[in-house]
Amino acid sequence: MPSDKTVTLRYGKSELTVGDVPRIVGTLSSSVVPPTARAICDIVELRLDLIGESFSRIESELPLLLTIRSKTEGGQWTGSDTQRLTMYRQFIPHVAAVDVELNSPIAAEVCQIAREADKASIVSFHDFNATPDLEVLQDIVNDGQQVGSIVKIVTLANEQSDVETLRALLGKRRGPLCVMGMGQHAAKTRVEFPKLGSCLTYGYLDKPLAPGQTSAAELFSQLRK
């Protein structure tokens, strides 16, 4: 189902629109949301592949994004996709959105579960080795927009030209798109790209979870000056 220009995250009696202004996602690898989170980020990402099922005890006034990242794309989940799908289904009533890898066999079903629950979905693509050609990335975005609400592209920038490729991809966006680079050449993309239209940027709340990831507090300082 093609993405629209904005996506609404619904949580409790509140809503948050994603796509019109850049939103800061604070990543969390433990079961405790820091008291400072509300002041420095818009969304809290729960990495259930790191936290475990203790997620059920987490409470937050912010919308929660549930991610169970597969080891094939940099996460710690090594169980079966059947188990992972069960966990998405179990916890989706308690979150505002879910994230699943576009290349995962369960991507379409996870996004369908999200739609049925009136929740948003992010389909993500990670390349920890390189940045594919622009045409390849554009095809990935097009495929992702047929599956989820938001497409997220994260690649390793080995050279400055890779950053330029990611910038060009962002310039071709047709719906809510999150683009970030990893590595020393790309740290600036987490601040620069939101100003160019990337709908989300990620910073850690407790510890970095990706190469070149900065803190949510630093992102807030740079973006909300």
Image (cartoon, rainbow, N blue to C red):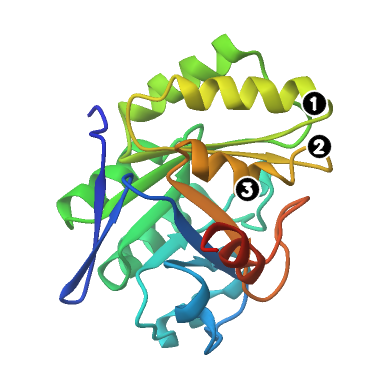
Residue under numbered circle 2? 185
Amino acid type, callout 2: His
Q: Secondary structure at mark 3?
A: helix
How far from the left and from the top, in percent, is residue 145?
A: 34, 28
Which residue is rendered at x = 57% and y = 53% of the image?
Answer: 69
Report the residue that reaches farthest toward the top. Answer: 135
Please report whichever mark, 2 or 1, sits nearer to the chain's N-terminal start.
Answer: 1
Using the numbered discs, state the Cα–Cα distance from disc 3 to disc 2 in whole angstroms: 11 Å
How far from the left and from the top, in percent, is residue 119?
A: 24, 56
Please report whichever mark, 3 or 2, sits nearer to the chain's N-terminal start.
Answer: 2
How far from the left and from the top, in percent, is residue 52?
A: 56, 74
Say left or right for 207 vs 6: right
Number of residues whose C-alpha sits closer than 10 Å to that of mark 1, classed few (under 14), some (14–19) or many (20 or more): few
Residue under numbered circle 1? 160
| Up/down of 225 relative to 70, above or below | below
Which residue is rendered at x = 59% and y = 26% of the image?
Answer: 167
Number of residues whose C-alpha sits closer than 10 Å to that of mark 2, classed few (under 14), some (14–19) or many (20 or more): some
Which residue is rendered at x = 43% and y = 51% of the image?
Answer: 22
Can residue 131 be seen here? The reply is no
Q: Nearer the viewer, residue 188 or 111?
A: 188
Amino acid type, callout 1: Gln
Q: Nearer the viewer, residue 188 or 18?
A: 188
- As drawn, the label of residue 18 is none
Using the numbered discs, state the Cα–Cα distance from disc 1 to disc 3 in whole angstroms: 15 Å
Amino acid type, callout 3: Arg
For the residues labelled 2 and 1, say whether their Cβ atoms are less than 8 Å apart.
yes
| Res 75 quadrant in image | bottom right
| Res 207 quadrant in image | bottom right
Residue under numbered circle 3? 190
